[in-house]
Amino acid sequence: MASREEKCGQDIATRDAYGAALAELGKRNSRIVVLDADLSGSTKTAKFAKAFPDRFFNMGISEQDMIGTAGGLSLTGKIPFASTFAIFETGRAWEQIRQTICYSRLNVKLVATHAGITVGEDGASHQALEDVALMRVLPNMVVIVPSDGFETRQVIDAIAEYEGPVYVRLGRAKVPAVMPPDYKFEIGKAYKFRIGSDVNIIASGIMVSAALQAKEILIKEGIDVGVINMSTIKPLDTQALLEAAKNSNLIITAEEHSIIGGLGGAVSEFLSENHPITVKRIGIKDTFGGSGKPDELLKLYGLTAEDIVKTVTEFMSK
């Protein structure tokens, strides 16, 4: 369960929420085991390790072995959570995830932290901007990008109950609390803050906060804007997408990921075949990131509320 502080709007990093949720989950479910690639202090799995040392495995800097071991543990009835930075989990171990986990549809949970450009000063080598694309293309894989700490804790509880492989993408920096206290996460179910008659913004992760800020600005300008939190990238909530597309003239996608292969790609693929409408994708535009403070990088790469507002007003003025 989320803490009262999270429900009341406290900023928290999604990786911190993950660590807390995992430790609580361990008390309730003895089948939970955790693997980490020597980054447990950063991924926050150290909290679980301290509470349940007999169910925690530091695999060292050996991501491929971590994935193989997680697969083996799942075959014994355990529910393995395997964590490291997103660039290493999805990049270095992609073949093992494909061949071992997804091909056999093993019950392994991949929870990766430090995704996106808000990793900050660590620079391009540590900023996974392609991880959603790498995981989304794999058959049997569920892909989830929570928007805040409150949602993250619910996601961790939900995937422990789900039978099959799941990839969860978390960040390094603190993010604003955006989900309402009565929100209940379901795999494959989007949350509709509101449906607009002019424009609807489909966002995930940290960009849900930017989308909500943009909505407030645009509504004051007389533009009816809706916002949907599409935290499950795969499977998409296609009913919510169709409702948004049928009620507006423009769909905007917003994500802290490459515009190729992520949320924007998934939305465009579905709508082009089922309800063609103009889609503008806001994300990293086919380039690597750079070193800097998170807020500076969000501005540099066009991932702010102001960038969403600019895209909408340019379209509406045509």
Image (cartoon, rainbow, N blue to C red):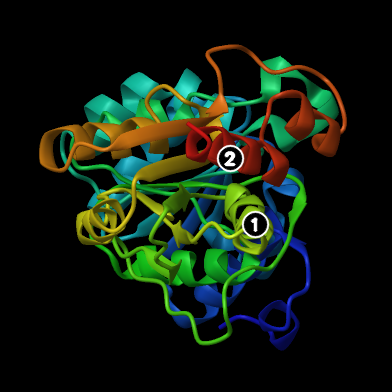
Q: What residue is shown with label 2?
A: 313
Q: Is residue 116 left or right of residue 118?
A: left
Q: CA distance from mark 2 to mark 1?
A: 9 Å
Say if residue 198 shows up in the picture: yes
Q: Eyeballing the image, is 290 above or below 6?
A: above
Q: Is residue 169 left or right of residue 97?
A: right
At x 31%, y 70%, the residue is 161
In the depicted view, which residue is nearer to us: 267 or 96? 267
Of the numbered discs 2 and 1, the one sitting upstream in the chain is: 1
**Circle on res. 306:** none
Question: Is disc 1 placed on a helix, strand or loop?
Answer: loop
Q: Splitting the image into 4 quarters, where does residue 314 fall?
A: top right
What percent of the width, then of the height, locates residue 79? 36, 59
Q: Eyeballing the image, is 54 above or below 308?
A: below
Q: Quadrant of the N terminus?
A: bottom right
At x 25%, y 50%, the residue is 235
* Identity, as a three-letter code, of the amino acid under mark 2: Thr
| Residue at the outermost top position | 287
Question: Is disc 2 placed on a helix, strand or loop?
Answer: helix
What percent of the width, then of the height, locates residue 262? 41, 32
At x 40%, y 38%, the residue is 263
* Identity, as a three-letter code, of the amino acid under mark 1: Glu
| Residue at the outermost front position | 318
Using a 10 Å C-alpha cutoff, classify the residue at mark 1 as few (fewer than 14 neighbours), some (14 to 19) or many (20 or more): few
The answer to whether the residue labelled 2 contacts the one labelled 1, judged by CB atoms less than 8 Å apart, is: yes
In the depicted view, which residue is nearer to us: 184 or 240? 240
What percent of the width, then of the height, locates residue 99? 23, 25
In the depicted view, which residue is nearer to us: 204 or 234? 204
Q: Is residue 275 left or right of residue 54?
A: left
Q: What residue is shown with label 1?
A: 221
At x 58%, y 85%, the residue is 181
Q: Eyeballing the image, is 170 above or below 3?
A: above
